[in-house]
Image: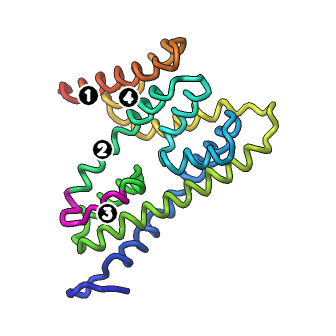
Amino acid sequence: MPFDKHGSPTVWSGFFKGVANALPLQIATVPFGVIFGALAIDAGLSLGETMAMTSIVVAGAAQLVALQMLVDNAPAWLIVFTAAFVNLRMAIYSASLAVHWEGVGPWPRVLAAWFLNDQSYALSVRRYVERREPRAARVGFFFGVGTCCLSCWLSACLFGALLGAHLPGSWPTDFAVPVVFISLVAPWLRTWPNAATAVVAGALSVALAGWANGFGVVVAMIAGIVVGMGMERYKP
């Protein structure tokens, strides 16, 4: 295992620590991936299309939104726009990580975009703040977390897709989407701005459900964000 001149473990040590830290969190990733894979097959996607989508997008919430819009026959540009909007937080994550990646070359940064998700960001930033480690160890830790998350996500989606291909058509699987989204959103509803965002976005999504091409979802997201940001800025 490589060490720097001070005897501190470098990239590979950080990598394996990242994997170890990420493993317990996959208890949430795996069921989510299985559900998405099964729903994608149920929506009419082939196994190849399902795995291509999950390998390129690599974002559970955005994939579920895109999948629902595909079922609703929304235009491609609106699906891409909405999925990108859902994943807009990744830009904030990138800016936050960049402070700790000063001096890292362009290719690791480009590759990191594929491994960036909620778990790899949260675990990496927490470790960066709590520990003063060499740059190589910080980068290795991020890729260790990302590799663990990505491997479990792709494997779970594949298993769900294979399982979904054998589910009877009479089984009610539509309930899984709202249940998954509730499980994703619920932990964030600890402040009034976050709660207001969820309520406004959720209410408008239902009210505007009849809008063509699922455009009501976009309007609901924008309205929810505006309300949440307004409350965050002007809260006492």
Q: Nearer the viewer, mark 3 or mark 1?
A: 3
**Residue ID for mark 4:** 195
Q: Crowding near pointer 1: few (<14 within 10 Å), some, many (20+)?
A: some
Question: Looking at the image, is 27 positioned above or below residue 13?
Answer: above
Q: Nearer the viewer, mark 1 or mark 4?
A: 1
What is the magenta range?
A: 99-112
Q: In the rendering, which numbered label is found on residue 91? A: 2
The percent coordinates of residue 64 (x first, y second) are: 54, 36
- Amino acid residing under circle 3: Trp
Q: CA distance from mark 3 to mark 1?
A: 34 Å
> The residue tagged with tag 1: helix, strand or loop?
helix
Q: Secondary structure at mark 4?
A: helix
Q: Is residue 110 magenta?
A: yes
Q: CA distance from mark 1 to mark 2?
A: 17 Å
Q: Quadrant of the C terminus?
A: top left
Q: In the picture, residue 89 is in which quadrant?
A: top left
Q: From where the camera sits, is residue 25 visible? A: yes
186 part of magenta stretch: no
10 Å neighbourhood of mark 2: few (<14), some, or many (≥20)? few
Amino acid beneath label 2 = Ala
Q: Quadrant of the N terminus?
A: bottom left
| Mark sitting earlier along the chain (1/2) | 2
Q: Label 3, on which residue?
A: 107
Q: Which residue is mark 1?
A: 229
